[in-house]
Image (cartoon, grey):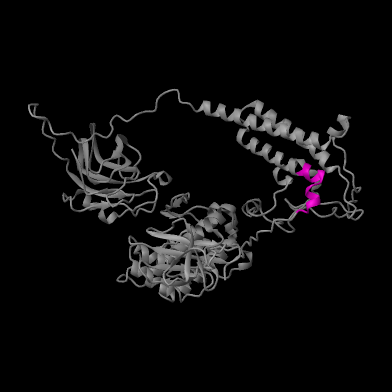
Amino acid sequence: MVAAGRPAPADGTPPGTPIGSGRYRLTAPLPATLPRIVRHVGRDTILDRDVTVLALTAATRNRQEVLSTAARAVLVEDPRTQRVLDVEHADPGHVITEPATGRTLRTLVGSGLTPDQVRALIGEVAEALDACSLRGLHHLNLSPESVRLRPDGTVQLSGVGIEAALLGLEDAGADPLAADRTDARALVELLYYGLTGRWPGKRAGIASAPLHAGAPVAPSSLVPAVAGHPDLDALVARTWGGAPPQSAAEVAHALRPWDTSVLPVVETAPEPVVPAEEAESPSALTSSALTAASGLATAYAVVAGGVTQAAAQAASGAKGLLSRLKGLSTARAVPPATEPGVAAAPTATPGVWAGTSGADRADRADGATVTLGALAPELVAEDVVPGSPEGWSPAGPAPGASAPHVGAAAPSDEDEDSGGPRLSLTTVVVMLLVLVAVVVGVYFAVSNLVQLGRVPIADDDVPAARTVPTPAPAEEGTEEQAEPSAPAVVSGAESLDPYGDDNEHPELAGNLVDGDPSTEWYSRYYAASSLAWKQGIGVAVRLETATEVSSIELQGTGAGGNVQIRATSPEDPTGGTLLAEGPLTAGTTTFTFPATSTGSVVVWVTDLPTASDGLLKMTVTEITLR
């Protein structure tokens, strides 16, 4: 059987590329979330359902551990986890999971969560982790992207066991309770982030929480609403104090009781069907055109607002014209089917957004019907009953209010002043087209002015030195070049990832200055060369004493990319003095620059080169300063 909406080939076989035993087929690629693992949308041809396929590759680390851990994860039946459904051991191996659905914790925090919702969300995750711990499985890499809230309001935790095995995070020879403590602390970090929107430490893309006495401040000091939940402040204080929780079960016990019914449920409303006769009526055409023009005027006001006075006047004129057209479109007779004494209400999805906060409504807008009131509320303010919830248009008159006269609309000031005949539909459409043309023209005019304002009046500062290729051997008969200066005495080296997780193989940093070109330091590999999303990574070399240096030699480098040579400390890798900048050359790259006295030098990578194995990563076997 072939799923609905999926065309089958002429021979009746299911679509997609078969893998392993042939039960599963790959239908579409998905963005990569784990290193050296390719994700696909798949199809279970026996149960006729969508699945997610994690395809291991020849470059995947710890393949056997990943497959064996996934096989144990199949036994976990907790509905709050992303279930591992099957494991295909045929080389190179595939792990079959249920699809990840819903919104991530990062998205939920952006739309706003109450303390009760955060308590329930993290409590559910803690119980799911406790169920996995009973099977000997731990996460050890919890992040806001690991936690999702499904559309039905239930929690989904992904990556348990598999991420720890892939990244080699679980040490069998260490303390057997260490993994439980790691997950417990990560749960409290997620709790803190959900309550405050800040991370108790450093995490890329999330603002750090302020510290007091070396620990993050109490959540209630940042969010007053948390003051009514002193047990949450106490749990945070314990975690960074002398009695941190030892397991996910202990975190769940500290959060009890919670109510899962407070978790937001987001149901996508079906798109309403408009009857053909209504869609062709002049009133419907005018209303549709008015909605489109209102959206354009609003978009223009967002882009060009405050740039020029002329643009503001154009937006004001557009608003007045839209108000006039609205009066034309609303002064229509109600169809005979409408009962006398009941006002016609604009089309809306019943009950959607009622009693919710503005941030929550914005986050739940996917799949909802956008009306003119959502785009230009000032044009339909008279249709909203005073005292009704924000964003809700009632189906009848307010209690105690008399029903408006059927088929008539209150005349606006513009209608009273005009004194002219009612405009025809053709005139309305022509005016709307002219309005759209004016709005588009003003937008492009403002855009050109903005672009002209960004043209620099002077050349950008260029570093004093650029990459200098290794000089070619001197020809016979020329003067013998001066001997190079002696290498500077180094005291050590370290890898730098201050805007990430500080995990660019710090254990290999000593290979950079051990005098042995056969040993190597290398970074993790990435899907793209640019590291602008986290400013960059790098390595630092410390000198025994402050020394004048005028060149640096990097051995074992790849080709391309871009690196900066800076006279600065490892604590401020993007500061100090920029000595040189440029791409790398395969093999050995040398940078020369004016002699500078410094106690440490940072090699900061903003764009990754292509290493000898074809991956986008930084590799260095030896660093020499002269």
Quarter of the rendering occupied by the N terminus: bottom right
In the figure, residue 308 lies in which quadrant? Answer: top right
What x and y, as percent, mark residue 135? 43, 76
Does residue 201 sit above or below 23 in this rendering?
above
Q: Which residue corresponds to the image point at 27% horizontal and 56% vertical from the top-left?
A: 507
Q: Which residue corresponds to the image point at 73% horizontal and 59% vertical from the top-left?
A: 351
- Of residues 126 and 220, the one nearer the viewer is 126
What x and y, as percent, mark residue 249? 48, 72
Give yes or no for residue 566 being in the magenta stretch: no
In the figure, residue 378 lies in which quadrant? Answer: top right
Classify residue 19 as left or right of residue 545. right
Secondary structure that dominates the magenta span: helix
What x and y, as percent, mark residue 624? 19, 42
Quarter of the rendering occupied by the C terminus: top left
Classify residue 181 as left or right of residue 488. right
Does residue 435 sit above or below 605 in this rendering?
above
Question: What residue range appears in magenta?
Answer: 274-287
Residue 324 visible (yes or no): no
In the figure, residue 4 lies in which quadrant? Answer: bottom right
Residue 222 visible (yes or no): yes
What x and y, as percent, mark residue 488? 17, 40
Classify residue 7 as left or right of residue 86. right
Q: Residue furthest left?
A: 477
Give yes or no for residue 276 being in the magenta stretch: yes
- Of residues 121 and 41, the one nearer the viewer is 41
